[in-house]
Amino acid sequence: MATTESPQMTDSPAPDSAAPEGEAPAAPATAAAAQSDAPEKVNWLAEIRGLALMLLAVLAFHSLVAKPFYIPSTSMMPTLWVGDRLVVSKYPYGWSWASASFHLLPRGNWRVLGSTPEYGDIVIPVHPTRDEDYIKRVVALPGDTIEVRGGQIILNGTPIRREVVPEVRIPFEPELICKDGPCLTAFEPFRETGPDGREYYAPPTWRETLPNGATYLTIDYTDQELDNFGPYTVPEGNVFVMGDNRDLSADSRAPAIANGLGGGVPLANIGGRAEFITFSLNGSTTWNPATWFSSLRGDRAWTTLRPPLAEGAAAK
């Protein structure tokens, strides 16, 4: 019996029909491929917007939360040394025009969520006529009457506790340069060689204790005009500040025309509170990367700047 063969089925597509005679075969979609290979254009507007937002975020953090601070002078020695880098918090006393980085806001007496510093706090007052940050210690609060006699602070008629202690030892660092020359020249009469063979300065040192028990060291080695001041009653909404290096500090004792702060500092002019040292450099840093490490004062990193309380004083 004859069999009939069925036609074979296939899943393969039928071949493209031949192009009519005289016409070129259809070219692949080369235009789309060329576009995909072309480099993307930079959206400069988006890039600039992203950079601006990042800068605004940094500015906001520095103005509202915390910012770095550099010590350029000896006015707060022995607590703060030239070359110390520290963190200043912006929120402890509320926010004002002085909180803004670069002092971008106009001056004013307003404050948001304002509070008053405590005795012994290290604060950042702004000069009354120049947009220049200082760093000083609060020694009198609103309503206090302060007087200085022979270097002794008298608060509300009572001398604060002040006693001689062993001299601080400040390393001899000749590379340390300040605005007017070598930073430690004033301490030359107290230069000596230590047991380790290194040279140090050992100026006369005192320990002061304020009414709340906050205690700290000061340097006072000569009689000078600012050793006698007042009496002066601190106005409401102000604090009275002094540097720990009593002989080389332009502070509330000195008039503004002499680079001082001219009496009480309005709370609205305080831009923050010093919290701790992050690192410190001794002035020998150069472009040589090896000096970036050798110039570090390792024992000063992470030192708190909140004053300890004297034994027996109650913490708030």
Image (spheres, rainbow, N blue to C red):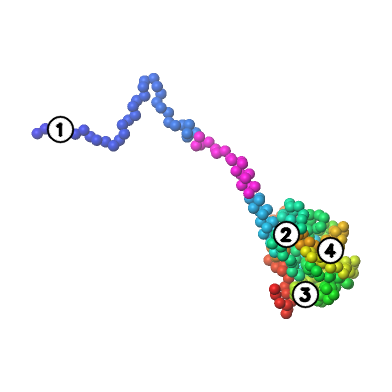
Tag 3–tag 1 contact (CB < 8 Å): no
Q: Work out whether mark 3 precedes mark 1 in sequence or the reverse, and give the earlier one.
A: 1
Crowd rating for badge 1 (residues with CA inside 10 Å; few <14, some 14–19, many 20+): few
Residue 111: mark in rendering:
2
Mark 3 → mark 1, Cα distance in angstroms = 119 Å
Seen at 55% across and 39% down, the residue is 40
Where, by quadrant of the figure, is residue 153 drawn?
bottom right
Q: In which quadrant of the rendered image does the N terminus lie?
A: top left
Q: Earlier in the sequence, mark 2 or mark 4?
A: 2
Helix, strand or loop at disc 3?
Answer: loop
Q: Secondary structure at mark 1?
A: loop
Horizontal relation, residue 293 to residue 229: left or right: left
Cα distance, mark 2 to mark 4?
20 Å
Residue 213 is at least partly visible in this image? yes
- Hey, what amino acid is under mark 3? Pro
Q: Nearer the viewer, mark 1 or mark 4?
A: 4
- The residue wearing badge 4 is 263
For marks 3 and 1, give the one nearer the viewer: 3
Direction from residue 216 to residue 37 in the image, left or right = left
Regarding residue 78, the answer to whether it shows in the image is no
Residue at the spot of label 3: 211
**CA separation, marks 3 and 4?**
20 Å
